Image: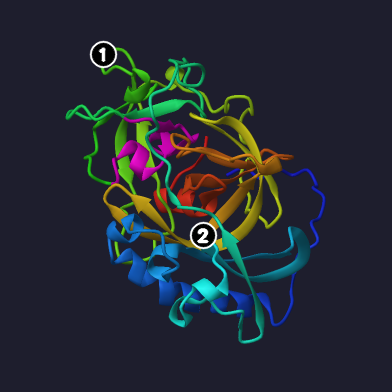
Amino acid sequence: MNKKSARRPQVRPLTPLSGSLSDLRAAKEEWSGRLLKRKSLQGVRAFTVAVTPDLDWNLMGVGIGEKIVGMQRTGLMCVKFLVRAKYHDKHIDKKHRLPKSIAGLPVDVDEVGLLRRFATAPALNTPNPRTRIRPAQPGCSIGFLNPAGQYNAGTFAALVKDSEGLYILSNNHVLADEGQLNPGVPVSQPGSLDDGSPATDEIAQLTRFIKLQPGAPNKVDCALAAVDRSTDVSNSILQIGPPQGAREAQVDMTVHKFGRTTGYTVGHVTSIDTDVSLQYETGIFTFAGQITIVGSQGQPFADAGDSGALILERGSNEAVGLLIGGSSSHGTASHLSDVLSALKVTLA
């Protein structure tokens, strides 16, 4: 991966209120293991029962981020519990209450709604990026061409490479149907939900993916499709341009993306180490150490169909993450360094 050599402004790190960052991480991992592991083993039912403060239904994730008090930033790091809905203590049984602090470390509770994978989207009118684009560019609609006739569409993340050739990068659930497809399945641009046709729109073939593990923490949701012809693809993201290498995400970093459904959006990183449970078609999967992003000015950062979008630092255009899901208020992304390492590729 090429690293951009220009100097960038230094970001003053946020500081823990008590203890060190390693203390916060240890507390996060303890409570993530305690609360999220049992959720991932329960299957879909935990997401479909009536509204309740029961943590098996209500808890979405455990992470590390900045403590917010009265809508104001404090500059202090804390353990953050992500919940579908916040309740007053008088409405919560003691067994379902989250701690006010953990071994002297501060705690914050953040209402995020239902976190789910972003995959197929409802059929809409088909403006850019849901039309046929040649060369196909990251940010546009793609999807697998399923012989069973399933309609789907996600987002072309980036063009990547190894010694064997060029690949389209996106999510496992966008290119491999959550690992249910075999290598060789054709990938079209646009996706079939956007009228992509196997006769005219195939641009790649599913090559490999990282298997999603039920009942165990996952780090990434990613897959590759080998490009049929290099002239049919570009590395220039719609409205953003080519990624300028890669770097690690930081808390409070301003980021942007271009996705199949919501197009160009801007947000800021609120956590770089959050464990979350996401609803998939084949069950509930837990992801460890994920990036959490909130859209700017109260706007959603992403929606269904944006899965697979590449997340980049806005100032440098260095890529930091791969969008995998979220809610109406929060986006969830895997660290790009983990994605590239798992698939053994680099940005093209």
Answer above or below: position of 175 versus 46. above
Determine the image quadrant of residue 145. Answer: top left
* Region in magenta: 152-178
Q: Residue furthest front?
A: 90
339 and 45: which is toward the camera: 45
Q: Is residue 169 magenta?
A: yes
Determine the image quadrant of residue 278. Answer: bottom left
At 49% from the left and 38% from the top, the residue drawn is 303
Q: Which residue is mark 1?
A: 199
Q: Which residue is mark 2?
A: 85
**Residue 28 shows in this picture:** no
240 and 84: which is toward the camera: 84
Q: Gap between marks 2 and 1, in whole Å?
A: 46 Å
Answer above or below: position of 340 versus 151. below
37 and 114: which is toward the camera: 114
At 44% from the left and 81% from the top, the residue drawn is 95
